[in-house]
Image (cartoon, helix red, strand yellow):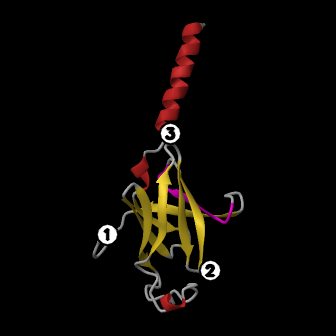
Amino acid sequence: MRTLFATLIYFFISTLSLAQNSANDILGYYMDSKREAILKIFEKNNKYYGKLVWMNIPDREDYLNPDTTKRKEKILGQIIMKGLSFNGTDSWEGGTIYNSRTGKTYKCKITREPSGNLLFRGYIGVSLVGQTAYFVKVEFKEKNSGE
């Protein structure tokens, strides 16, 4: 009986360790569920950032930006996700994400599905009050890549 119990515990722990993410698992390119943009997630100084590298309307200006001096700037090429940290097991949090559709910046938390796709949770205050966006991992070649 002890051997069976020990085997079950070993199996459970090994399964959990396979389900855990490593910090750089979110690196790469992701398309939003509406197929309007591709976000490149990259790491810099142990923090994770997201830059818009493709949009279906590439000339769209950031006309709702609260900083009026930036309203004529194109959204394409902007770093809209900033400063997330890996929590060691299953999510990246502690950063922000900018929503150009509203002109607002929200706290951000990302969880990664086993498929490699991401769930972005943008919120104010606590994560229970917010919205979740789904991003699918894609293959993408940038014309020029430089951070």
Q: Image quarter for residue 38?
A: bottom left
How far apart are the two marked residues, 1 and 3, measured between alpha carbons?
29 Å
- Where the C terminus falls, by quadrant? bottom left
Amino acid residing under circle 3: Ala
Closest to the observer, 13 or 36: 13
How far apart are the two marked residues, 1 and 2, measured between alpha carbons?
29 Å
Q: Is residue 89 above or below residue 16?
A: below
Kindly identify the residue that appears in the image at 54 percent across and 73 percent down: 98
Amino acid residing under circle 2: Thr
Which label's residue is closer to the chain start, 1 or 2? Answer: 2
Q: Mark 1 points at which residue?
A: 141
Kindly identify the residue that appears in the image at 40 percent across and 78 percent down: 77
Looking at the rendered image, the disc whose residue lies closer to the viewer, 3 or 2, is 2
Q: Which residue lies furthest to the top in this view?
A: 1
Q: Name the residue under label 2.
A: 102
Q: Give the range drawn in magenta.
A: 115-125
Kindly identify the residue that appears in the image at 53 percent across and 46 percent down: 90
- CB under 8 Å between discs 3 and 2: no
Q: Where is residue 99 in the image (x, y as percent from the top left)?
A: 57, 75
| SS label for mark 2 | loop
